[in-house]
Structures are given as structure tokens and as C-alpha cells.
Amino acid sequence: MTTAPGGASLLEIRDLDVTFTGPRRSLRTPPTVVRAVDGVSLDVRAGETLALVGESGSGKSTVARCVLGLVRPQAGTIRYDGRELGPVDKRPPELQRAVQMVFQDPGSSLNPRMSVGAIIREAWQVHPAVAPAGDRREALAAVLTDVGLDPGVAERRPSALSGGQRQRVSIARALALRPRLLVCDEAVSALDVSVQAQILRLLIDLQASHDLTVLFITHDLAVVRQIADRVAVMRKGELVELAPAGELFTSPSHPYTKGLLAAAYDLEGVEAPFRETQEQMS
């Protein structure tokens, strides 16, 4: 966890609105409209980990996909280092490289027909300036080593790896383009508790060694407590609270945040995995 109090904003989100149109209930009624994100404004400071939390359907993953340019908002602006971010296919190459994502499920985000090496080299084929063709063997070995994998796994396919190894490959693929902002969308929720601790420790170490800024999307408050500098809480598409992590856990101000904390730490079986993760990371 890197503390960045009062640092300059690397990512600025202002008045973000996203609506989705659903099916008609009948031929006589208009399509249903769901407002997934409602006027969200948020800054992510350079060098920090900002956790965006909320229950399923709160809009946090939609915000992440807007940052990546995978979802186009109906209103609002997103700026990276002072430059406006549009749809991913409209971004100049340097902005495409600068913002990368680690998805929730490595099993579905990695092409099962490609080897690990081919998956990572594909990023360099799109952005050859990052790793010239003659340097890619060494660059591939280096990025796999960075995420705690033996370079020999480059010849294997994702199906031959464990869940934790596949998520390390996903992180390596993102790091291959040398981003400054890493968006992690529920990046450890599909993993066992022991593997979660390993991946969280890896992300903390990589943030320091690669000078990363991290937007961490999750519903798991035990994870937030370990990795976040600040926490933003979303409910029904709106941002309801933003506070330093320590302050939010000790003195939350919004009733919804208090409810999330009470639900997480009062339910039987939740506190024990939290303690186990904490011990494994220490």
C-alpha cells in the first residue's frame, strides 16, 4: 500500500452519467432505462490505490469500464494526466498503453487457444514500440519473473495453470505495456483466500516497483482494508462516501457505509477469512 496524501490527480472523473436501455415489458410500454452511474465525480491521485466499493449493481464496474473506454457515458468527462479519455479505439497509442485492466476471471479473459507467451506478445504486436521484436524474448522472461512466474510457463496454455497463476498472467499482460494506471475489477474475488493474499501482496509490491496508480474495484471490505489508501463507496450509481481507508473503517459517516461494514464483520464466517488473509500477507 502506497500512501499518496494530497498528491496530484492522475485520473479525474467529473459528473459521469451512464444509462442502459433494457427490454420492453410489452409492445405498448417504452423500453426500461437503468441509470447505472449517476453524476459520479472522483479523483485518483498519482501513486495511490483507490478502492471503489459497493454491492453488486452499484455501478462500480461500469465506472471502471468507462475509464477503460469500453463503455461510453452519456454525460461527464474522464481525464488522464490532464488529457480527455474517449472510447478506447479513439485514443492515441500512448493513452491506450497508459491505462490497463486486470479482469475478474482470468479463465475467461485469457484466450485458451494461445500460449502464455503468445498472449503477452500480442500486446507488443499492437504496440511494437514498447518491446521491439528483437528484445521480446528477454522482455517476456522479465515480465513473467516480475509477477512471480517461471519464464518456462510461456510455452504453456492457461488451462494448464492454476487460478492464481492465470491471474498472474493477466497482471503480466497488463504490465507488458508499462501502464501508469492499473484498473483491477474484482481481481481477486474468483480466487481462494490463500491465493488472494498472494495476489494482493504481488499487487502491492508491483505498485511500488513499477510506480503504479491503482483503481481497485471490489465488494470485499477485507481486501479493501489491506490494499487501499482511500475508499470510495457507491450505492445505486451514486458516490455516497469518500475517505481515507483507516478513517472509513473506524468512523464511517454514511448510513450505507455503516451497513456494509456491519454486514461484512457481523456475519458468521466473514471475520475468520479476513484474519487468515491478514496473517498470510504479514
Image: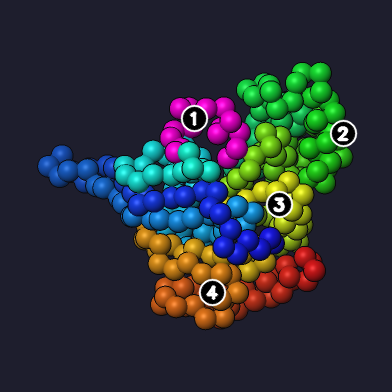
Range of magenta residues: 84-99
Q: Which residue has dot 3 on it?
A: 207
Amino acid found under the numbered disc labelled 3: Gln
Amino acid found under the numbered disc labelled 2: Gly
Distance CA(mark 2)–CA(mark 4):
43 Å
Q: Which residue has dot 1 on it?
A: 91
| Mark 2, secondary structure of its residue | helix
User: Position of 155 compared to 248: left or right?
Assistant: right
Q: Position of residue 174 (x, y in %)?
A: 66, 39
Distance CA(mark 2)–CA(mark 1):
34 Å
Residue 96 highlighted magenta (yes or no)? yes
Distance CA(mark 2)–CA(mark 3):
24 Å
Where's the C terminus, which quadrant?
Answer: bottom right
Relative to 275, is 163 above or below? above
Amino acid found under the numbered disc labelled 1: Arg
Q: Which residue has dot 2 on it?
A: 152
Q: Which residue has dot 4 on it?
A: 248
Residue 119 highlighted magenta (yes or no)? no
| Mark 3, secondary structure of its residue | helix
